Image: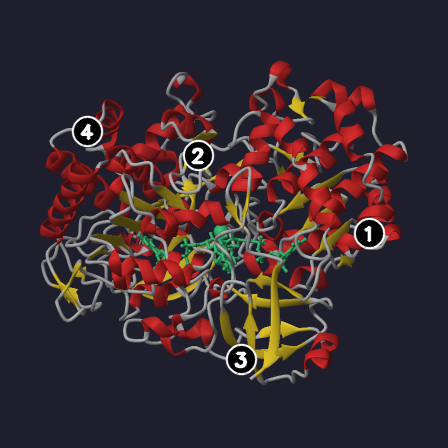
Amino acid sequence: MGKGPNIETGELIEGADCDHDLPFCKGLDAGGFLGLPCAVATIAHTTCNLCEAMCGLSVTVEAGRVKSIEGDKEDVFSRGHICPKGPAMRELLEDPDRVRRPLRKRECRTFKEVSCDSTLSEAAEKIAQLQKAHGNDSVGVYWGNPVVHDHGTVLMSQVLGLILGTRNKFDSNSADANPKLFACDRMYGDMTSITVPDIDNTDYFLMIGANPLASGGSVMSLGDVRGRVKGIVERGGKLVVVDPRRTETAQVASVHIPIVPGTDAAFLLGLLHVLFSRGFVDETAVENVATGLAELRAAVSPFSPERVSKFTGVDAATITRTAIDFGSAKKAVAYSRIGVCHGKFSALASYLVEAVNLVTGNFDRQGGSMFPSPAIDLSAVARALSVGGSGRFTSRVRGLPEVGGMLPCATLADEMEGPGQGQIRGLVTLAGNPVLSVPNGDRIGRLLPKLNFMVSIDVYINETTRHAQLILPPRPALARGHYDLVLHAVAVRNTAKWSEPVVLPDPDTKDDWEILQLLSKEIARARGGVSKAAAAALDRFGNMSSEKAIDLLLRLGPYGDNFVPWRKGLTLKKLKASPHGVDLGPLAPGRLRKVHKPNHKADLAAHDMLGDLRRLENEMSRAREGLLLIGRRHVRSNNTWMHNCHSLVKGPDRSALMVNPLDAAKTGLKDGENAFLTSQTGEIMTKVKVTDEVMPGVVSLPHGYGHGQAKDTLRIAGNLAGPSMNSLTDDNVVEPLTGSAVLTGIAVTIKPV
Ligand SMILES: Nc1nc2c(c(=O)[nH]1)N[C@H]1C(S)=C(S)[C@@H](COP(=O)(O)OP(=O)(O)OC[C@H]3O[C@@H](n4cnc5c(=O)[nH]c(N)nc54)[C@H](O)[C@@H]3O)O[C@H]1N2
Ligand SMILES: Nc1nc2c(c(=O)[nH]1)N[C@H]1C(S)=C(S)[C@@H](COP(=O)(O)OP(=O)(O)OC[C@H]3O[C@@H](n4cnc5c(=O)[nH]c(N)nc54)[C@H](O)[C@@H]3O)O[C@H]1N2
Ligand code: SF4
Ligand SMILES: [Mo]
């Protein structure tokens, strides 16, 4: 027993239990002074969970409070790199607007604090009532992006999904990576067989629709983002960025190729055309690792650089040169991300990126595209939880396909609005803000108040959660243990790291894992029975700690000791002894392990993929008019939810619409003035920034703004300028194979206010 800090006030509580084993309590990292009381300033090591870069953080903790946060120079993956959001984790922890206790809505529409137990059982009763009266599908769920950033939430959200037994499950992946995962499924036979660029060893990196210097990298976890991206050019390699905007990444690249939004599939077909026609494809070598080469060659033959040039806005000579450089490089890799995943042809384009790597012999080899080998086998976890696969069922109203058991968020509003059996009457949101994130989010905002019941598991009262009757807040990230279950599986180097909590959790609070666990149990109880699979999942995970789950999965993983104890493999205990992480080595060839097609050969001619070429041909023959809207990310922002941190939003307004000087002149717009931006879906007012950063014909707006509606509960964000980009995007338009949202290349018109 010693002095324990109160996390809310930072005060030391005499006689509070201080045998909680946290590094900061015992001064372990300050030089092994075991047993020092909590009041001693110590440095604890953890991992930032805000983006995919997995940066190691060194956190100075004094009397239970976070004093400062820096990059952890000894972190095996991030090597000291952080961005401004890492230190802002302190503000997230201390933000007076962060929800700390469960809340129930009152008649007057404000919230009141209530006890956790009563909220959980109340939520469960309401859900069970609706499901008993109207069927399981009457309760919908929306899981958001931070789910991926917490191991407990990734696992336990699957259990809650099983308990609810509803088809109406939606997630942010349908506005994110699904096209890429779907392409991997078609190419390699599993949605979790995801290739990442071997950035540390490549000579030529073709980056399409991604801006890691702002985003930290995505489906390519990049510790030390700057070092790794700049490293390509510094060691004499070439970085080529294909993007309608001259982004932060394009500025450090060897070449920037501006492209008309939504046309990447045609650009890639042009590249493939040249690679085939100029003899860069070694047929024998490719046929050792892939099937369908002849079909692919035939399919790309109509798409000469000359033919795709007008549509893509990239001249034929540039396409030809890029293909020749790629084909001639010793080790080259193509990679695409959100700019491609948000296009109308997102799945096809993502597939063609894999094809470029395959036909040039850069698949599954050093410096090319490779499969990581994480300490926890994500594919095995996905199989065990029946995640994976697509098109096994479709949505009720529009018949859109599921991916990984989840339906497209672009049809969430339809399922809430469309009457009949299966209409959503109750909603559970988990770490998501669909009002700002989903295409035509305003429509979701109009429908949420009409629900019979809504419960949100979230840390803020924001544009979405303010409509809930109950809000269940989890512990903040710094007060819980952390393992990157998902991100290690898409990392450019194999590492593993467990992070202990760095501040003492308030004993009255629960983390996401516990909230989901208890809610699942309460629902099962209130319903008086659940499906066999759900009961089995609850049986397995319902009483386990999330730490225990990670230990188990590590032991079962490829470096674990469960089956071969004498190998003395990885366990949680061993990871705990290495607070800067454990390096498991560079990426290594993995085709035999990861390609689940006949003879472990990738499929270059999946019929639905090549079948989509006809739709592309149609699009290419259509006339285009007006301006095309694209999104953007800034290093000081994170989707919709980090604008309440003063350190991140201070300084210049970053929400303005970027307009090329030529378009500004045509439309009579001046820098700094306001303009109306109109699409088929809606109209917003925005400030204009005239800049040649964006190519002519394209305008760029960041997503994640539009906080005016949550002014009372997000006191910093609510006063920021900036509309929601998703007031303009159209929920009626989706990529047809995956139902993914189309969030780039939106036709808009603009006029001065
Ligand atoms: N126009 C346009 N739309 C887009 C995009 C775009 O580029 N342009 N990007 C898309 C992409 S890639 C994504 S991933 C989605 C994101 O879509 P969402 O996931 O819906 O949005 P986020 O802003 O990530 O919302 C995160 C929510 O989780 C809460 N939260 C934060 N930490 C925790 C936690 O530890 N536990 C819990 N329970 N809650 C927490 C926050 O308060 C917030 O409410 O948006 C998509 N929408
Ligand atoms: N700072 C910060 N970091 C983040 C996030 C954040 O909001 N802020 N969000 C996180 C999330 S959820 C994700 S999914 C990742 C995303 O990570 P990235 O994929 O790197 O995302 P962006 O930075 O938006 O880069 C996308 C780029 O695509 C370009 N683009 C738009 N349309 C097209 C097109 O049609 N074709 C081509 N070729 N390019 C196009 C845009 O101009 C933009 O530069 O970032 C994560 N990290
Ligand atoms: S790049 Fe920034 S937000 Fe991403 S993990 Fe590192 S510190 Fe966190
Ligand atoms: Mo995302």
- Check residue 309 in the rendering and tell me which mark sits there, or answer none: 1
| N-term-proximal mark, 3 vs 2 | 2
Inspect this view and state whether residue 494 appears.
no
Depth check: give the residue in front, 118 or 532. Answer: 532
Nearest-to-viewer mark from 2 and 1:
1
Nearest-to-viewer mark from 3 and 1:
1
In the rendered view, would you say 305 is above or below 376? below
Q: Report how far apart the C-alphas of labels 3 and 4 lie in the structure.
A: 53 Å
* Residue at image mark 3: 652
Residue type of the residue flagged with mark 1? Ser
* Residue at image mark 2: 404
Task: Confirm or deny contact between disc 2 and disc 4 (CB under 8 A).
Answer: no
In the rendered view, would you say 259 is above or below 647? above
Nearest-to-viewer mark from 3 and 4:
4
Look at the numbered disc 4 and give the secondary structure of its residue. loop
Q: Report how far apart the C-alphas of labels 3 and 1 lie in the structure.
A: 37 Å
- Check residue 530 in the rendering and tell me which mark sits there, or answer none: 4
Residue type of the residue flagged with mark 4? Val
